[in-house]
Amino acid sequence: MADHSKNKKRPLPQWMVAVKEQEERKKVTKSPGTDEKFPTSTHDETQSSAQVNCTKKILSASEIVSGNMPWLRYEGPITYSYSESDCACICQDILSQLGRDSLLPRVVGFDSEWSVSFSKGSSPKTAVIQMCFSEKECYLFQVSCMLSLPKPLQKLILDKRVVLVGVNIEADLWKLERDYDFRVKPALDQGSVVDLAKLANEKLKSCERWSLDGLCQNVLKRRLDKDRDLRCGNWDNYPLSKDQQLYACNDAFAGLELYKHLSTTEK
């Protein structure tokens, strides 16, 4: 009886199959008569669909959810001041208006910006102070262009009729004191400063270390544009670009909106 097992082909090892398939793909992508040293196909064209899929970033569930959230943007007028005298006039006008419409304190979204230094031990001074009073009233004071912090601006920050709200706001105020020799302790002592991260943990019964964007996503179901180039840009440069102005206003506006929502949330 003839032994047919000698005529059977042994299967190739898996690695050899993969190599052979790759060689076949290269033959298909080359035009007839072309030199192998100069293939007409690019590397991307010879990639298999599996290889392409492997290079795609795998998003987490939270990234997918946040990516579908609408943006939170301030869309009102922006009052941008870089002159000491101009800033003083604006703040004096705001002070004169406080309490006229209501006996309740005026809640103000507060934040500040400064340039990022990559030098060890270097801490650039606060460059911009942003204050948002409503969805149609936001002020930017580029204090880095001023010789000193205008007295009316100091009075506005310390005024008992104003409640300043923001994430990590106490640290921003202490930095302002160090940078401009301006005592902020009275505002902290009189209870007119609200850290939204602490308020959120109290209302939501959590113990998170909230960022402003994180709070917006979890509380308002909106996301903030935290573009790194803007966040880490030069805030001392005059004039601020339109994108910088909007970025700064967005942060102050977000603080105001978060406070409105959290203050009406039951514990």
Image (cartoon, rainbow, N blue to C red):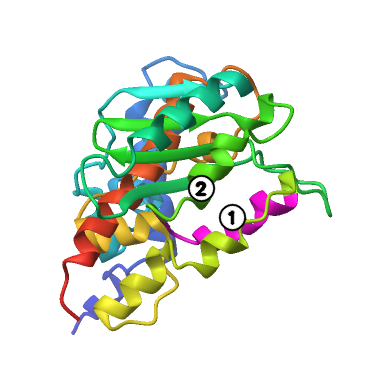
Q: Are marks 1 and 2 in contact (CB under 8 Å)?
A: yes
Query: In what quadrant of the picture does the C terminus appear?
Result: bottom left
Q: Position of residue 195 (x, y in %)?
A: 43, 65
For the residue labelled by badge 2, is the local secondary structure a helix, a strand or a loop? helix
Q: Percent position (x, y) of residue 239? A: 57, 17
Amino acid identity at mark 1: Leu
* Quadrant (top left, top right, bottom left, bottom right) of the N terminus: bottom left
Secondary structure at numbered mark 1: helix
Identify the residue under disc 1.
173
Is residue 36 in view from this perspective? no
Task: Count up the numbered dots.
Answer: 2
**Residue that badge 2 annotates:** 157
Residue 95 vertical placement versus 61 (above, below): above
- Looking at the picture, does residue 48 appear above or below residue 213? above
Segment colored magenta: 165-178
Dot 1 or dot 2: first in sequence order is: 2
- Give the quadrant of residue 3: bottom left
Q: Name which quarter of the figure residue 243 lies in.
A: top left
Residue 5 badge: none
Residue 114 position within the rendered picture, expressed as x and y whole percent measured from the top left: 63, 40
Residue nearest the viewer, comparing 11 with 257:
257
Under mark 2, the amino acid is Ile
Q: Nearer the viewer, residue 249 or 21?
A: 249
Residue at image point 25% right, 65% down: 61
Question: Is residue 99 left or right of 131 when viewed as pictured?
Answer: left
Question: Residue at (31%, 74%) from the top-left corner?
Answer: 6
Image height check: is 111 above or below 184? above
At 65% from the left edge and 42% from the top edge, which residue is drawn? 126
What is the chief secondary structure element of the magenta stretch? Answer: helix
Residue 167 among those drawn in magenta: yes
Q: Position of residue 94 (x, y in %)?
A: 39, 33
Disc 1 versus disc 2: nearer the observer:
2
